Image: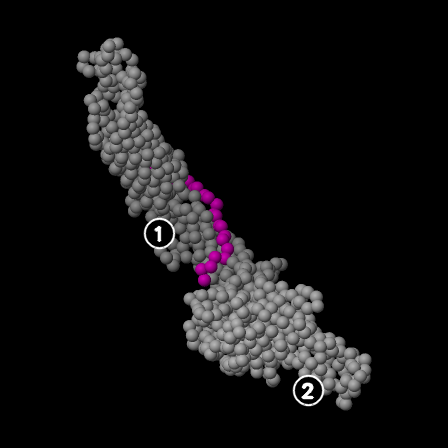
Amino acid sequence: MLSAPPASGAPSTPPPLVEYRVRRGDTLQGVARRLYGDPRRIDLILRHNDLGPPPHRLRAGQILRVPPDAWLAFVGGRVEVHGPERRVVGGPVPLQRGDRVSTFKHARAAVEFSDSTRAVLEEHSVLLVAGADAGQVPGLRTANDTTLLAGSLRVTGPVDGLAVIATRWARVELRGGDGLVRVDGTGRTRLAVHEGQWRVTAAGRTVTLRGGQGTLIDRRAAPQPPRDLPGPPQWTSVPAPILFMLGGTVQAQGSFHAGGGPPPAMWRVQIAQDDRFASLVVDSLQPAAEDRLVAHGLAPGVYFARVAALDDDQFEGPPSAAVRFEVVEVRILEGGKGEPARLSLPQGLFCGLDGAELAAVHSPLPLIPGRAHLLRCAATPGGRTSELRIDARQAGLPRHRTEVGPLRQDGGWLRRQVLLRLSDPAGRPLTGLRVLARPEGDMLAGAVREVEPGAYAVEVAWPWGRRPGMLHFDVGADEEIAVLIRAAPPPLEPAPPPVTRPPARPPRPRPPALPSTPAAQPAPSLLLADRTVWDLSVGATVLFSDPAQGPFGRGLLLGFGRRFPLSRGALSIGLRAQVEDFSYHPGVRTPCASDGGSPAMLCIRSREGDFAYLFARAALTLSIPLTYHLRAADRAIVPYLGLAPLLVLDWRQSQVLGLPNRVRRTEHAGLVALAGLSLRPWRARWGSLLVEAGYRHVGLAERRRNDASLGGFLLMLGFRAEH
């Protein structure tokens, strides 16, 4: 609801009363002239004193309780009053002539005068008040002589009459309307008239400002010519009239755009708890590009929001229309003793649940368990509405009971019917709920049907010889999960039907026909064949190179990979790292053989005689195997074939007596063709044994005499863990 700021004809806070002692010869009109500068303001005296019918006669020494000429009407944050003594104030207090009102960070104070002039100090401001303590300072009139020494002052002039607000270098006459007076740190004064007409006098020159105009006054200088202010911003979208707080915080959102005049350089966004914006909870500046209002952490209550535009010289234009919204705390009361959960709302709202007409809220609204609800509320019967969705889980869990039907056999499949009965805490059946069934493992489930009020049936089936998994029910509306119910039929393992002559290759059972489902159910898949699987492999390897040399290398293998299911079999890809050792046992001095020595030795001739030396050799092999598994992964024996490109890092270390060791490293590329078996004799779900054979071809960049190749036949024994 958009609302304009209300008229400021009367003070919003009752003034604190002070005592005035009647002097000899005082009359009612004379006291009004002495206190308020206007003999017609006897109404202020009569309003607070019982003087009987006219003519009113005063006697010397009589005590009259009268409102002061000025008082502090509102205090937010830390506000100090410096007068005869310094004091921190926290509420309405009368002000004396010469009192200084100072506001600190995030503080505001509203000063009101008897002639209905209202001045609101923003943070870091100092105002010298010219209010009078009745009876002590005669001759004081209205807000004349009240001076803004520093900071910002929002002024609303009197409905009738003239008010004066001064700065060090200027004097401003207000005849109604409202605007902003600011004195910066250099002493310059900025005036911005939002409504009405102001007369500004400085350095002997007077300038008249109308609504939507402003002027700048330098120290000891005349006012500059009037300039246009940015227009009031226009709301593009306003916050919802009611923001529901249900177990968390709320966020008020809105957007706006410029309303004409000079382009804005910044926005001032204000949210207050009163329509005069004295009790501010948000007062922030944001760049012109951020044309959105976003407020977090608001407590329950009524709020008002407005936006104003500032030009590049910090002149603030008129604010936008004020937007009213309310933050409402909503609670869900848990049911018990046969009572459903209820929705608790504050009284004074007009609400309806699930499409019902709006009505005044007098008591909590009952909720149906397991069903989502839509709440609509308005502050007034014909006002804008706000909506709150309550999911099925928040509405409470329905009471449930499951019944499992008898076991039936259909070919190679076992079938059962599961019945889910749902009711509210009072035992009344819950009808019309949307119930979905989700089976686990190899079990299939059909569509859920309501066979009787509150009873929902589903047909499940699983292959013979397998254990049925868990059956989950999703209960709720709008696909919102309300409760998770596990109904596990007792595992039965009936004896297989007698077969006199089993066929050599029995056909695989076909899934039975189930009731139609919203989406076609896939055929049951075998273990690990209906999902991708990660695996980790470890093993030991032996390399046979040249047959004349016997076993040439031995090593350890570590690898991981991922297997993807296919319609028949599976395809896997991985990464393997293998460390191989080709070290020989240390040799001894021996005469060189006539044929040049053994294949592991090199002949060295020296003065001390002939001797042989051996060399150490190691390799790190990195490969990327790509394999195809010919059978489903849960079979006892799964053959597979594959190819793997590889990279070999080869190190040689010479061991010559009397000479320093020498290490050389070379890199080679190659390819491995492999075939293997995955053995799962105990039908384990988490691993299998591996037996793998293959041939490795490695292209050597160089090869010494009697230096065997890194290629050859491979044999690997290992274990593979699956997840």
**Range drawn in magenta:** 478-501
Instruction: Give the prevailing secondary structure in the magenta stretch.
Output: loop
Residue at the (24%, 18%) spot, across then down: 601
Q: Is residue 229 left or right of residue 701?
A: right
Q: Residues within 10 Å of mark 2 (few under 14, many from 20)?
A: few
Relative to residue 135, is residue 458 depicted above or below? above
Q: Amino acid at mark 2?
A: Arg
Q: Which residue is mark 1?
A: 522
Query: Residue 560 at what x, y percent from top left?
Result: 35, 38
Residue 366 visible within the image: no
Tell me whether the residue at label 1 lies in contact with that at label 2, contact meaning CB atoms closer than 8 angstroms. no
Q: Residues within 10 Å of mark 1 (few under 14, many from 20)?
A: few
Find the distance from the CA under tag 1 to the CA under tag 2.
94 Å
**Secondary structure at numbered mark 1:** loop
Residue at the (57%, 80%) spot, across then down: 173
Q: Which residue is mark 2?
A: 40
**Secondary structure at numbered mark 2:** helix
Coloring applied to the structure = one colour
Disc ID at residue 644? none
Residue at the (71%, 77%) spot, across then down: 137
Residue 482 within the segment the image draws in magenta: yes
Residue 97 visible within the image: yes
Q: Quadrant of the C terminus?
A: top left
